[in-house]
Amino acid sequence: MKEGRPRSFYVLAIFFAAYVLFLYGPMIAIYVLSFQGPQGGLTFPMNGVSTFWIAKLFQGTGIVDLGAAFRRSLLLGVIVMIVTVVLSVAAGMAFRRKFKAQSILFYSAIASLIVPSIITSLGISLEFRIIDDLIKAHWNENFETSMGLLTSGLGAHLTWTLPFGLLIMFAIFNRFDPRLEEAARDLGATPWQTFRHVVLPIILPSVIGIGLFGFTLSWDELARSSQAIGAVNTLPLDLQGLTTTVTNPDIYALGTVISAVSFTVITLALGTIHVLNKRQAAKGSDAGQGLV
Amino acid sequence: MSEEVLQQASPGLIPGSGTARAAKPTRLSPSFISWLQAGPMMLVFLAFFLIPLVFVVIVSFWDYNEYQLLPAFSGRGYTDTFEGCLAQLPDLCTIGKTYLKTLKLCFMVWAITLFIGFWVAYFLAFHVKSKTWQMGLSLLCTIPFWTSNVIRMIAWIPLLGRNGLVNSGLVKTGLINHPLEWLLFSEFSVVLALVHLFTFFMVVPIFNSMIRIDKSLIEAAYDAGATGFQTLVNVIIPLAKPGIVIGSIFVITIVMGDFITIGVMGGQQIAAAGKIIETRVNALQFPAAAANAVILLVITFLIITMMSRIVDIKKEL
């Protein structure tokens, strides 16, 4: 540390460190506890160290059919990620010009973000129930339900991920130099070429960030799924169901496995962003640095 | 414009541009392109957010019996919700007590997250000088947001439980004789978990406001003889106000509608606005659930309107 830091620096540095400890400490505790010995319980001290509980999860002899829930959550997460990236980038591009309904879309996104999740979830479930009733009454009496993972479930997750995607796009284009596109146009690029070869490479790191938000928010989503997912459960819903019944460390083991997926995705995404940024810094032009 | 001028001035200077133009004789109008770009997202919000909200309002005025919805106008969803409220005056009825409790939780969580969020953002924005460190430390605060909320709630069990680390530590040091019961599955653990989960929503917007503050303003304040405290109150806080308001809106709306954290950390024993809706849905009383959702929506909307009077949200994003 350099000389001349004010005393407030040290006070706040300690405060910040305490906050980080508060954030991570409990999480680390359950990661450690999921390696309890076979006789171990829900709390410290550790009763031996083993992978007993994690192995038990994968044998499928444990609590619920986690394999199926795992695959469902993964599928949904990947689809939500792709849709979030594509729709957010497209809408973000649209916001660079004025267009009618601009403020309607903006306020819909903000409202979707802050209207309590339980209300959105209830609304989607009512909507699908009413659609089901209509189908049963007018077309097919034996119709079961249109609710499901990739209909109402997907929609519910998108109402949560798309606002983040759109806000990230705003942040990107706030510091995007439009002269780069003008230059591309001046050189005769079509709008698509301009996007593909000029805009996209520049915004790619942030677009991966949108994908990261899309996947992780869906992977862990609970409140909006609760009423709108239909008959099947996603992994977080199964985990929440276990909180009231389970008395041994399988629940921690499940938590650790779910987190392991999150951390893998976070690491992959941040690693890619880092590599892309380095490449941009190394190979980037001097555009925007002034005329030669 | 400029490309056309260039084309006329020296055709053939830019190979390919002529063919690219010739290949596209009809250009899509800009407004049509905007619709193509923004339309899909608009449709998602329409189908899965706006129309569902309309259904919530409509169904809240429907009738119901033990097992199904009856699409006929009825105020039963509301009258059931406010049952006994007039008769019990001046005492509060169940719904009144529940909302009062929710608002109380909300206020506590808001005050604590604001305090923590403000100083964490302050440290990141003003004390961390290197951009790399700033990025790294912000990321450190963001990563938990990308992991599961339920796991972050469960994570408190081994610490706060009857035989948890805190209790056994306190008993060992002799500060208490019996484990504290109020540490887990109580209002305390609910507030703790909410603060743990959602301080992030306070840090990000406040940090964003603070990072935009021109550092020379702060220097000017010092040069004019202001103390550190005076600079904080008269310069930094007013300029960080938009972030404070946006963060507050996030935290307040999340806590107002929360039923998962309050359920899991309150041992399913604490009543709250969001939990009423969940209970009604589980009992298949959809109109009553919808009526409660409308009430919650109105109250949340009132709070947001009050707060956004202070700041123009659209300008700040």
Image (cartoon, coloured by chain):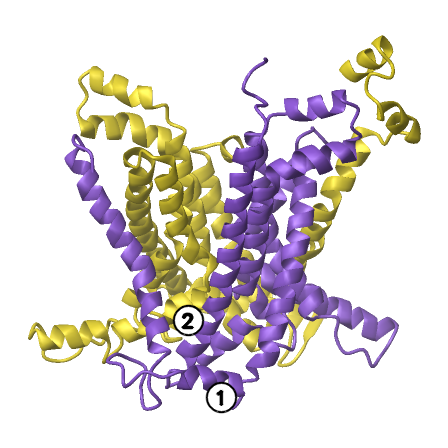
Please, what is the three-letter code of the amino acid marked with disc 2? Gly
Q: Is residue A197 above or below residue B222?
A: below
Residue that extends furthest to the left in the rendered view of this protein: B174
Judged left or right of residue B171, residue B33 is right
Report the residue at 23% width, 44% height from top. Answer: A13
**Residue located beneath label 1 in the image:** A62
Residue that extends furthest to the top in the rendered view of this protein: B9
User: On the image, which quarter does residue B150 sit in?
Assistant: bottom left
Q: Quadrant of the image for the C terminus of chain A?
A: top right
Task: Give the yellow chain's letter.
Answer: B
Residue that extends furthest to the front in the rendered view of this protein: A282
The disc label shown at residue B1, or none? none
Task: Give the purple chain's letter.
Answer: A
User: In front here: B265 or B171?
Assistant: B171
Cα distance between the residues tagged 1 and 2: 24 Å
Q: Is any atom of residue B87 visible in this view?
A: no
**Residue located beneath label 2 in the image:** B263
